[in-house]
Image (spheres, helix red, strand yellow):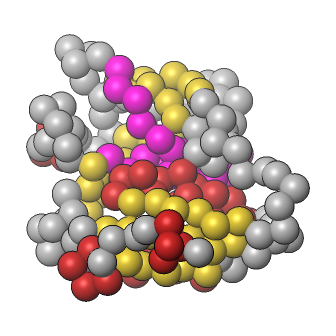
Amino acid sequence: FDLTYEIVQPDGSVDTLSVGILLGGRWPGHDAGQFAFVTLDPSEGAHPFTMASAWTGDGHVQFLIKELGDYTRGLGSRLQLGQSAEVEGPYGKFNFDGPQRRQIWIGAGIGITPFVAQMKALSIQRGSKPISLIHCTAELDNVAIGKLRADALAAHVDLQVLVDERDGLLSAKRLM
């Protein structure tokens, strides 16, 4: 598989990699919220990452990888454009279906990735029910939030961004 990547660090506060992989061979496609085991370095082995892209059949898969641990910290400096990668999956089921007339999604940090993928899917084929997404974050990163707002707008999702220091923490009372 061919690898492309972009380091998303607009102000140094959100250390996240956007890694795109062009899949070859037989990929069955994936649903929003699913994950795959990705091997970027054979000596490290496979790591699970949630796919941040909708499946369009063109072979492209996008991952958002937060630099949180020993392996992911500094990963961007170890990647090379065009290097090979191994992708196994998809796995899991993040179910966006249901009989409810409205959905409220709550995401935070890198846990926003399944919702990003579903918004990308909804921008291709719009759903029929109103959706509100509440994104809670400790740090405000205007570039990352701008991308999230663009995805929400394209998917017709009502986005509310809560910054801990500015807005306080989300509670059940506040949610109601």
Q: Which residues are magenta?
A: 46-65
Vertical order, 165 against 86 (above or below):
below
Vertical order, 95 against 125 (above or below):
above
At a point 15% along the width and 74% down the height, the residue shown is 11
Q: Position of residue 66 (x, y in %)?
A: 27, 49
Q: Would residue 62 be counted in the magenta stretch? A: yes
Q: Position of residue 120 (x, y in %)?
A: 62, 63
At a point 17% along the width and 37% down the height, the residue shown is 69
At a point 39% along the width and 60% down the height, the residue shown is 108
Q: Quadrant of the C terminus?
A: bottom right
At a point 44% along the width and 25% down the height, the residue shown is 37
In this view of the protein, can residue 59 be seen by the observer? no
Q: Position of residue 31 (x, y in %)?
A: 68, 43
In the displayed structure, does residue 81 sit left or right of residue 58?
Answer: left
Vertical order, 171 against 163 (above or below):
above
In the displayed structure, does residue 156 sit left or right of residue 112?
Answer: right
| Frontmost residue, 42 versus 13 | 13
Q: Would residue 6 be counted in the magenta stretch? A: no
| Frontmost residue, 48 versus 2 | 48
